[in-house]
Image (cartoon, rainbow, N blue to C red):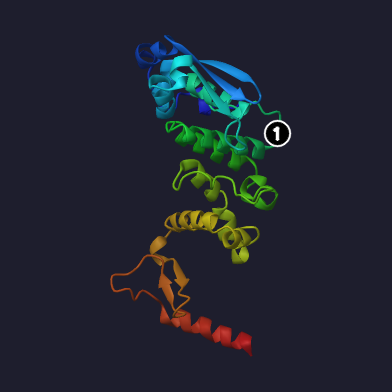
Amino acid sequence: MDKTPEGKDPSGSSIENFATSTLPLFHGPLVKIRIEPSNREYTVSKTLLCNESPVFSAMFKGNFRESQEETATLQEMEGVVSTQSIEALLEWLYLRTINFDIDSIHHEGHIVAAVELARLAEMYGITKIESQLARYVKERFAKCGYRHNPIDNRAVLPDEDGWILGTFLRDGHPVRRAVAQALVAWYLQSENGGYPSSTLTQEYPKFGADLLYEVRLALNTLKPIRSATFKDPITGKRRYLVKGENDEDYDEDDDEGEEEEEDDDDE
């Protein structure tokens, strides 16, 4: 069973707070969530569900049919609404753990399931789960050899419909960022960006923008950052990664040496 580290509540709530604030949410009126066409039905604490989701709150507390029937019927949607994602969401609502009933030793399936859960939660405005899901995704990536061979990692490659995992989530979503972060090390350590990152950034500009942002943040962690240089593609001069006060931070001698080497290669 996959749970958060040490089974701790990520919110950091104390036992007293759980007993006085959280436990009462488990009681009181109940509502039902029905999944079609699989015809699965779940009974849930109305207060607990509505406390986390403004969308469900509007359904069950407003002048909608769901409020009168105390039942919400959800249509299955590939990559978003499924019995697996609904059951995982309900477990998180009650236990604050991320867990998927997947009989597989491969981490990719768990990553895909986590992104599906993230999309479901986003659809219903459940934001408290996002950072916890991002940590789960990163932990799974860390265990699956993502850095050494992302070619075999289907979690960072386009699916059969040509979509890259996570890009359906809003810009800046923690889980969407985690998927892009999984390709940063490979992109930086492989010559010319390497495959598949060089292809992905050209054919999938949305993912390319995500990766560019994460690469920029990764470069900010270089040590020692103030001595790291790069070759300006416009002038051919070497500049420090950290911009100087007069924007003239480059080593002409080093740059001239590089140009001479390039001329020699041309000959």
User: Pointer 1: what residue?
Assistant: 105
Secondary structure of the residue carrying tag 1 is loop
Query: Badge 1, how many Cα within 10 Å: few under 14, some, many 20+?
Result: few
Residue drawn at 45 percent across, 24 percent down: 9
Q: Pick out the residue farthest to the left.
A: 245
User: Height in image: 40 above or below 124?
Assistant: above
Observer able to see residue 152: yes
Amino acid identity at mark 1: Ile
Residue drawn at 58 percent across, 32 percent down: 81
Residue sitting nearer the eye, 157 or 182: 157
Instruction: Give the position of the C terminus as an image quadrant.
Output: bottom right
Q: Pick out the residue farthest to the top.
A: 28
User: Height in image: 208 above or below 109?
Assistant: below
- Residue 233 x %, y %: 48, 76
Q: Pick out the residue farthest to the bottom.
A: 267
Answer with the quarter of the image where residue 136 lies.
top right
Answer with the quarter of the image where residue 244 lies.
bottom left
- Residue 216 x %, y %: 45, 58
Residue sitting nearer the eye, 196 or 84: 84
User: Height in image: 198 above or below 73?
Assistant: below
- Residue 160 x %, y %: 69, 48
Instruction: Give the position of the N terminus as an image quadrant.
Output: top right
Observer able to see residue 45: no
Seen in the image, is 155 located left or right of residue 232? right
Residue drawn at 59 percent across, 55 percent down: 186
Residue sitting nearer the eye, 179 or 43: 43
- Residue 215 x %, y %: 49, 57
Disc count in the image?
1
